[in-house]
Image: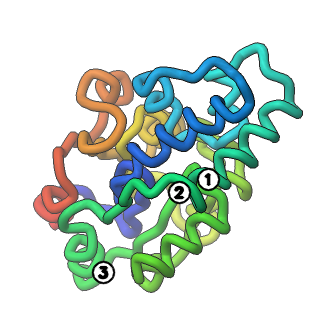
Amino acid sequence: MLDVKVVIFDWDGTVMDSVGKIVNSVRIAAERLSLPVPTEHAAKQIIGLSLDPAFKTLFPDSTAAERELLSEHYKDVYSNVDKTPTPLFDGAELVFTTLRQRGYQLAVATGKARRGLDRMFVETKTGHHFVTSRCSDEAQSKPHPQMLQHILSELQLVPAQAVMIGDSRYDLMMAHSIEMPRIGVTHGVHGHAEFAPFNPHAVVNNLKALLDILA
């Protein structure tokens, strides 16, 4: 059992089943700008990063101006064009409610921009569960641990008092770098093999399994 005070969740691929929509939006944005359209697999691998480093990874020869255009098109496609459903993963609401009843504080550290996360909080009616959150436009991109450091500072905690829950290696990498406990979830982007180098406390295949670990 982990003896922590705050549970920090990634959002896309961890709390919300949005991987398909993100992949589609990345590929359509590239197509709009006549750039080589990345494969679904390649687009999936950058999920978790902030947009500029994500596009720099996919398009290493791109300029900052091109990546800015890509970001604008991506946001437009994600918000207004692609209609792929993005439900919460099964059990998310139960997990949030139960963990709060057990005395945990909840937080979010996400590659989404603040406007996007706030919109998701409203649409999913989950914002009230979280005491704080950090987004891609408020801190350095994952895997840099700055998002986590900001959350810890705000809550006056040390890394050992928090646990990071994420579906990508970037989530576990940033927690590992500051010796924060970490748990991988396999229903998003990455799995056991990608998590292994970062010594997760556990790897689960659904959110409900967290309730056994965070007893």
Task: Left or right? Give the position of 159 relative to 152.
Answer: left
For residue 110, which quarter of the picture? bottom right
Q: How many numbered marks does the figure carry? A: 3
| Mark drawn on residue 76 | none
Q: Which residue is mark 2?
A: 109
Crowd around label 2: few <14 · some 14–19 · many ≥20 (10 Å): many
127 vs 113: above or below: below
Circles 1 and 3, Cβ within 8 Å, touching? The answer is no
For residue 27, which quarter of the picture? top right
Q: Which residue is mark 3?
A: 100
Q: Secondary structure at mark 3?
A: helix
The residue positioned 21% from the left and 78% from the top of the image is: 98
Q: Secondary structure at mark 1?
A: helix
- Amino acid type at circle 3 is Arg
Q: Earlier in the sequence, mark 2 or mark 3?
A: 3
* Residue 31: percent from left, percent from top: 64, 30
For residue 34, which quarter of the picture? top right
Identify the image quadrant of the N terminus: bottom left
Q: Secondary structure at mark 2?
A: strand
- Amino acid type at circle 1 is Met
Circles 1 and 2, Cβ within 8 Å, touching? The answer is yes
Whole-number angstrom distance, CA of label 1 to CA of label 3: 22 Å
Task: Left or right? Give the position of 56 relative to 163.
Answer: right
* Residue 175: percent from left, percent from top: 47, 42
Q: Which residue is mark 1?
A: 147
- Amino acid type at circle 2 is Ala
